Amino acid sequence: MLKIEKEKLPELFAKIAAGQELYLPVNISGQVNFAAWDEEVQVDLTTLKSVKSPKDAFFPQSENLYTCKREGKKITIEPEELKNQSFVVFGMKACDVQGLKVLDQVFLSDPVDTFYAARREHGVIVALACHEPEETCFCKVFGIDCAEPAADVAAWMAGEELFFKPLTEKGEALTKSLEGLLTPAGEAGEQAVEEEKAAIRAIVEKLPYSNLSLEGWNGDALTEKFDSPLWEELYKPCLACGTCTFVCPTCQCYDIKDYNTGHGVQRYRCWDSCMYSDFTMMAHGNNRTSQMQRFRQRFMHKLVYFPANNDGMYSCVGCGRCVEKCPAALNIVKVIKSFQKQGGEK
Amino acid sequence: MSIETNETFRPKIVAFCCNWCSYAGADLAGSSRLSYPADVKIIRVPCSCRVNPMFILRAFEKGADGVILCGCHPGDCHYSTGNYYARRRMTLLFSMLDYIGVENGRTRVEWVSAAEGVKFSATMNEFVEKIRSLGKNVRLGDLRCRS
Amino acid sequence: MQELIKRAKELLADGTVVRVLGWKAGDLPYNPEPAYFAKDTDFADFVYNGFCGANLSKYMIEASKMEGKTLVFLKPCDTYSFNQLLKEHRVEREKAYIIGVGCKGKLDIEKIKALGIKGIQSISGAELTDEAETLTVQTLYGEKTCAYKDAMLERCHVCKGKEHKIYDELLLTSRDTTDADRFAEVARIEGLSPEEKFAFFQKELGKCIRCNACRNVCPACSCRKCVFDSNKFDSSQKANADSFEEKMFHIIRAFHVAGRCTDCGECSRVCPQGIPLHLFNRKFIKDIDEFYGEYQAGEDVDADAPLTSFTFEDVEPSVVSTRS
């Protein structure tokens, strides 16, 4: 294990950024989101959660697929280049890393999404342990240990130092390029990290959602859950906005559209939300005609359909962003608890 | 921006003209052999109040450097009151554009009657000059529309 | 809060209303959700406290389509929205039994968190019966306190007043929370250079994730189909291309509610990225006041709306470039 003093972090970022693109949590007008590093930006590693999850770095909200250009009578098609240089995402949390594994199931299984695959191949992830978990977190429910993030490099903030531990080849290579800045952590360092881990885990035990039970939520629960009258009640405050889907680290739906540039067409894809009335709109109309159905889809997908198709893996990682951000204070925890309550009353 | 580039810069101007007055005014300018720059592309609309704020923003998005709306003089609207509504809407929209930092003067409303061919040509010449001095519209254009 | 429950139960019992629209406590101390209560549901989780910021007028659009009368609890600012919806025939007066509830200013959990208070377990001091001076927050990291005022939503600092504009009866007392000028920030921005203005809005709108929360929560945005949801419309609603799409969306969103926006502040409250969206709406309100005379949407159901009326002497659009 290696370490670096917190005050030397700008140097570390500069050195990483000298070799490749570096994305990390940045405060812009009061909100923390992952963005590219430069000397001007205000890096914020203390805010626990970025508003948008860092899935953006691998699956951007909007990205071009190809461009058609017209010059006279000639039409040319230029495919967008795939990512071909390495980049570093610094400061992802354990839940965000698990979120990528969910996306991998979708985008890396046949047919492989080449844009995503290229980014995954070239992305080096430095994951940071969650220094002070908050009441909206429930990653423990999904078996995630936020004290021990598993990515290319695992990092911990303890005291005045940041500890750095490469876990994969990519991580080793990055660490090597940072020689001189990182110094061996030594016995005392190992000790400090162990203490930090213990402190994190102690807090996690006390979090209100940590003992949430997922009993009954699995791939087999399909018809029973789908037909439940509870959905009619639960969806009512939903405003049909896309906040929950757009801050979510595992939501992967997108739409493909053409943009008329006046001298050609750009085909691009952008995140879409199952909460929207025009989601998967087809010639005959929409296959989910009410907001209740759209609301149900989101949670059924995360807790029933996805595990049914992916060996029991839920497509929720308990990051709690929807808990924080929903304008109507709805969220996946309320859904899970409502079903539990109903079960208990029976 | 240097003077040189200013001279070679040909702005794209969109002019929304109402069918009953301003479009006829443009016609008169033409038949009277009054000249105005070819940079002005006229779009005929039934009434100045047909122009919704989205039209103006869309013109900018797709690469216009200036947008001008011409309609009947207040009181002369073919539909009696259309231009009064347009006047309020455009006042608010222009003020909003100014507020978000779009250079003043890229948008304009002018009342031109069917008899005012001279005014039409003079207005267009003046407006093109103004936009030329402001240069390219960078703040409201869509990056994707630039080739 | 007990008064509200008592009155709701009475009105349900005597058949005046068939359902109650209020707030249900969440599983965290600060996330109550808008909810319906019926005769046979118990009111155990009914709640009305400082975190009940949601404007229930919006939900009355749907409730007006339901069978029977709905009892709705409206805060003073919400009644402006209700009036405006009434004016636009989007809600039905006879479908609503309005209890105007007192308000001591609503709280913004984001502001509390921005003060460094996290790991929240419980919050006291947010009830209507409290003095609303100090909030005491129990957290996993110890007890924290903060001034009620520092945790208040922006909109409450520029409150239009605690007088209900429409109601059937009133319950609970309010406290005046106005301590700032509503248009100060707009005026400050107006005074900047075009470059500074542009940089400011570019930075703010650059955060937009196109979630549409601002639009969907807005009581004035009640179109059955939004122009930004139309697939016949060439500009996508979902891309967040940093150059133009968000600007177009936010200008048009604000324009479509200009003269109808009551400045209820819901858009800014719900924005997940903390964009001060009220600055757009307030700019239109300020301009309308200056150009066409003071107007407060939702104050008077019968007043002429500024964008559907005119005078012969209205200012010309050129006023924008000539005023200092």
Image: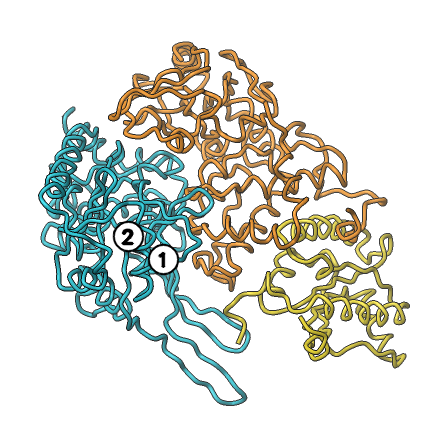
Chain colours: A cyan, B yellow, C orange
Q: Position of residue C248 (x, y in %)?
A: 56, 56
Check whether the beta carbons of the residues at disc 2 and disc 1 lie within 8 A of each other. Answer: yes
> Which percent across, then down, holds residue A54?
30, 53
Q: Secondary structure at mark 2?
A: loop
Toward the viewer: A100 or A292?
Answer: A100
Quadrant holding the N terminus of chain B: bottom right
Q: Nearer the viewer, residue A300 or C237?
A: C237
Q: Quadrant of residue C88?
A: top right
Q: Earlier in the sequence, mark 2 or mark 1?
A: 2
Q: Whole-Å distance between the Cαs marked 2 and 1?
A: 9 Å
Rendered location of residue B29, percent (x, y): 86, 75
Q: Quadrant of residue A329?
A: top left
**Residue A39 relative to residue C29: left or right:** right
Which residue is outermost to the bottom?
A73
Q: Which residue is mark 2?
A: A251
In the drawing, does residue C154 fall left or right of residue A337?
A: right
Q: Give the vertical position of A49 relative to A59 (above or below).
A: above
Q: Residue at x 44, y 69 (%)?
A: A258
Location of mark 1 (residue): A271
- Foreground residue among C178 and C231: C178
| Vertical order, A135 against B42 (above or below) | above
Q: Amino acid at mark 2?
A: Cys
Discs 2 and 1 share one subunit: yes
